[in-house]
Amino acid sequence: MASIINSISFKNFFNYYGDYDTTRYEFEDGVNIVVADNGAGKSKFFNAFLWLFYDQVLDSDDKKKKNVKDFAVKIISDKAKNETSIGEQVQTGIKIEYSTGRYKYQIIKSFTATRISEKLTDFDSWQITIDDIEVDKTDHVLPKYKPVYDAEEKQKVISQLILPTLRQYSFFQGEEVDKMIDFSKKSSIEDAVRTLTNISKYEDIANIVKDIAVRAEKDLNKQTNATSEHNTRLDKAIVFKDELQEKLIQESEKLVEFNTLYESAEQEKNELEQNFANAEKRKELDDKISEKNKVLKRVKDDYDSFLDGINNRFFDGNFSWITLGFEDSINDFKNSIKEFRQKRYEKRALQNAAENPNDYFTMLPVNSPDAVTLDQMIEDKKCYVCDRDAEVGSDAYNYLLKLKNRPNENNTKKEFVKNDLEDFFGNLQLNAAPFLNKFDSIHNSILRTREKEVELKNKVEKYSSELKALKSQRKDILIAGTEGEGVDNATTIINQYKGSIRRMEQASSRIERLQDTIKSLKTQISTTEKEITNLRPKDIPEGFTINYEISKDLVEATLQAKERVFDKMVSLLEDHANKHFQSLIKYNDIKGGVLRFQKSPSGGISLDYIDDLGNEVSGASEGFQRMKKFAVVMSIISANTSQYNYPLLADAPLSAFGKAFNKGFFEAIPDVFPQSIILVKDLYDQDSEDKLTDLGQQLLKSDVIKTFYLNEVDEESSQIERTTKIERRK
């Protein structure tokens, strides 16, 4: 009969504060679910069975398993520790009850801690005493427990809950599914086959008959050498056979070496396979991010350069922004400068007239000749104003010269006003000249500049938003086992993946050549053995020859029998794996394909998903890869000729699955495991009124689910006050 866990209770175990009766789960055969968010006791529940089976717990800080005796202080509930005074004791323990067809067992593992110092979490503040394990036994007729005292029997009771050889298939955390079977190693699948079949007996027989064959051949050769009828040709044939066998050993060793290389490359390929598709997507996004960064940088540079140049437009004559609002000032300046110059000219004229009255007060008419006319009159020696001759040296000629040279006679500049601002205002006019004709265009120029600024700013925001979205997409594409950017390098993963395939191909090519060589050597050895048989002396007792021939045939027969058993079991596993896989993917869009176990050149088994046309379908997600592995785990169990008699204890097996996978998972596992206890956070929804996702609510109502628990902790409480609240919903 199957082992069924009836209950598990905790006493001051991590966040499970209180005695056994206040922190108790009761389970039934079939599917049992414990829903909990991070930190709500899910992994601590799993730790109870780690302690039961291996005297270890998993440290959530570094994800490493620690011995209970070395980790005890952290196992004790912080609230219980805080309530323990110096000199007082606190007990921490787990209590598990399970039953088989006839008997029921109760197991208590605990330790006692005595507080010896003030520091609450310091290991040196506590003295730990590991208590003796308590095992009680009863039958279903007489429910009163009786203690088991024998240490071996106690261990047997613990072991039969889940046999040690089967725990890897029945007791695991989500990511451990990937490690249960390494299909790249022949030994891995053989271990599974060996667990389910008597193939090891064939191996023992093969080793025995091989030893018998070696001894039979030695005896036969000894008898041959003892006769006088053997000849040189026979001796040469025997030596040649020995040489062939030696070469066969060498080539076989090389084959083992290249098989190892192939397995190593295939293992690396398998480890990277679930990340390869994601890595390609990340590489594609990396390229887009790189290109988007370049575009964004270029647009940002344009934007920054544009902003830097805006101030220049105030003083640049092509824009003349500084004159905005000064339109009326131009007319004011014109009127002022006109008035200024009029007064200036008047003052200067008065000064000049006072100093040189004869130069300014002449008898010339109003329309007196200009400088050009004076030059002509001097040249012609005639005054055209009065129509008289003006010979050189005459008074009339000299007077014409005086009129011509009048402005240059007095080069001494004399101040005629206190502050002469003629040059200052002139420079103002000269410098302002480029700005005077821009008034009508300034408003449009500012408007176009603002539009350009908004356009560039919008581009920066657009490309920044697109870049953020690409980075978010890249972050969402998970690559298992990696965290930092240095480790999580998509290009490195792609190169490693392709490199492993290349090494597999190279090793496969060498394996094929070595196999051909080994096959040829075996043929030569067989031919040489026939020759030796024909050349052996006729007087050798027949029994030696028959003994050798029979033992040689037995070696071949046992090896072939082992291979047949192995191949048959692999075929059986494939059939069962496909049945389970179809159940697991029932609610997914993956249709029309089957799982295929293919023998690799190294003798291992590759697990592929083949479509209707025989093409390999690559699973792009970690969940898809893990689901294939879990289908094989289920097939290993169900392929056994007898019913599987042990419960499934799984912590976060759904972490990489989607909603459809999860639904198929809960419906499929009852077909294999008589009882399953699934610890999961994926069904928890903090924002929901009942704290469950839609799928969680569906499962709560499903007849497949026998018990349903919800764990919660008060996040607002301090760590030393935090406890796990257990609510049974079903």
Image: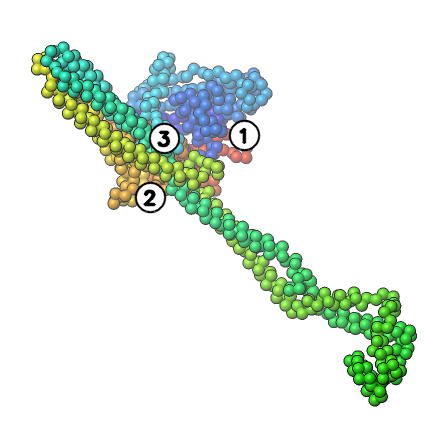
Badge 3 density bin: few <14, some 14–19, many ≥20, Cα 10 Å? few
Q: Are marks 1 and 2 in contact (CB under 8 Å)?
A: no
Q: Nearer the viewer, residue 185 or 641?
A: 185
Q: Are marks 3 and 1 in contact (CB under 8 Å)?
A: no
Give the amino acid at mark 3.
Lys
Q: Residue furthest front?
A: 392
* Left or right: 61 in relation to 143: right
> What residue appears at the point 42 percent right and 20 percent down from the top-left corner?
55
Q: Nearer the viewer, residue 503 or 675?
A: 503
Cα distance in 3D space between marks 2 and 3: 24 Å
Task: Note whether residue 393 is visible.
Answer: yes
Give the amino acid at mark 1.
Gln
Tell me which label, 1 or 2, sits earlier in the chain. Answer: 2
Q: Which residue is mark 2?
A: 588
Q: Which residue is mark 3?
A: 179
Q: Secondary structure at mark 2?
A: loop
Badge 1 density bin: few <14, some 14–19, many ≥20, Cα 10 Å? few
* Residue 175 position by quadrant: top left
Cα distance in 3D space between marks 1 and 2: 42 Å
> What residue appears at the point 25 percent right and 43 percent down from the top-left corner?
614
Q: Which residue is mark 1?
A: 719
